[in-house]
Image (tube, grey):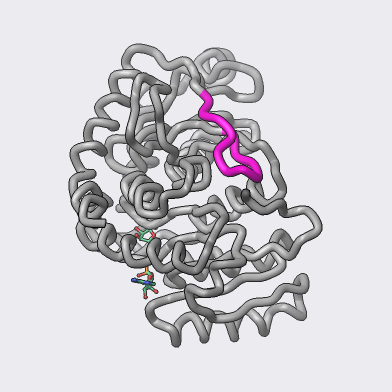
Amino acid sequence: MQKEYENKTTRVAVIGTGFVGSSYAFALINQNVADEMVLIDLNKKKAEGDAMDLNHGLPFGSPMKIWAGDYTDCKEADIVVITAGANQKPGETRLDLIEKNAAIFKSIVDEVMNSGFNGIFIVATNPVDILSYATWKFSGLPMERVIGSGTILDSARFRFLLSDYLNLDVRNIHAYILGEHGDTELPVWSQARVGLEPLARYIEKYKPEATQEDLDQIFVNVRDAAYDIIERKGATHYAIALGLIRLTKAILRNENSILTVSTLLKGEYGLEDLYIGVPAVVNKHGIERVVEIDLNDEEKKQLVASAETLKKAMKPVHEIAAVK
Ligand SMILES: NC(=O)c1ccc[n+]([C@@H]2O[C@H](COP(=O)([O-])OP(=O)(O)OC[C@H]3O[C@@H](n4cnc5c(N)ncnc54)[C@H](O)[C@@H]3O)[C@@H](O)[C@H]2O)c1
């Protein structure tokens, strides 16, 4: 039986305190959502330094227990967030990271499970869809308790760029990116909404000067955002950290939030046996349900193509899982 969070000490374990993990840890101390946070990294000194630095900020925030620990500390964790592993070098795709990171994941997930962990995994390491599937396979946990960050960040980027283009509050833009968190992802233009208006109708009424080229470019900027940021500063980490916080809160506060995460499909969207970014309801159980939104024919085709790319790239995971 999974633990209930009410009236208990909540613990988050962060595995990998590089750019993404440490940004997430910093954001978490500002959110008053967990009581304890343990930082685990192959580079123990980095985790220790981060724990010291974060602890020194506590007088300015909310009480929390933070320490650099090891895998035994995962036993009591409600959520293990994995951000460990190689990141993209300039020009490298996310799928290029599969060989390196699948092997790392086998050892990490085994260690976490050996601790007696009985909570929810959130996976952010790339290629996130494939490593979420790997975490599900390696851990033996029910699929609802292994969640990948999926296209949570891509949808946020999409919403931001649309809001910027339309000069509107980003919170009034409702639009999803689905599919692989990577080069084959797709924008769901057919369902994008501004307030309650369909996006196309809003543009027709209030931004008639908008062009198809502008909209196409917005998607290209979403899809290629990681390349553009990595070229400038070597890593992307703040926005994904906030996306991971959003997921953490949805779980610990039992929010029943609809978020575009990577989850196992079992026939939804006509797809099965893969993790891929789709909207899903997230609460204290993890994934409560996948939400199947209507896609037009072109979007359906793009989603199937994205799924095929992921399935082809999954070979190293199947090989490692077979050795088990
Ligand atoms: N899902 C997303 O939207 C998204 C966004 C940005 C980055 N990422 C991914 O997050 C991952 C981390 O990126 P980063 O920029 O923080 O990288 P980084 O190199 O800064 O940090 C990685 C950390 O993992 C640690 N590590 C490596 N192997 C380990 C192991 N076996 N056990 C424990 N710790 C280990 C390293 O010591 C390092 O501190 C990358 O795969 C990156 O592509 C995902």
Position of 112 with respect to 274 (left or right) is right
Residue placed at 57% from the left, 43% from the top?
286
Can residue 225 be seen at all in this image of the molecule? no
> Is 55 or 39 nearer to us in this picture?
39
Residue placed at 39% from the left, 61% from the top?
109
Position of 174 with respect to 232 (left or right) is right
Percent across and percent down for residue 210 are: 45, 23
Percent across and percent down for residue 239 are: 51, 54
Where is ligand 1, by quadrant? bottom left
For residue 197: magenta?
no
Residue placed at 44% from the left, 38% from the top?
263
198 is higher (above) or lower (below) than 126: above
Q: Quadrant of residue 36?
A: bottom right
**Picture quarter with the C terminus:** bottom left
> Is 148 or 21 nearer to us in this picture?
148
Percent across and percent down for residue 8 are: 76, 61
Q: Which residues are magenta?
A: 281-291
113 is higher (above) or lower (below) than 58: above
Percent across and percent down for residue 2 are: 62, 50
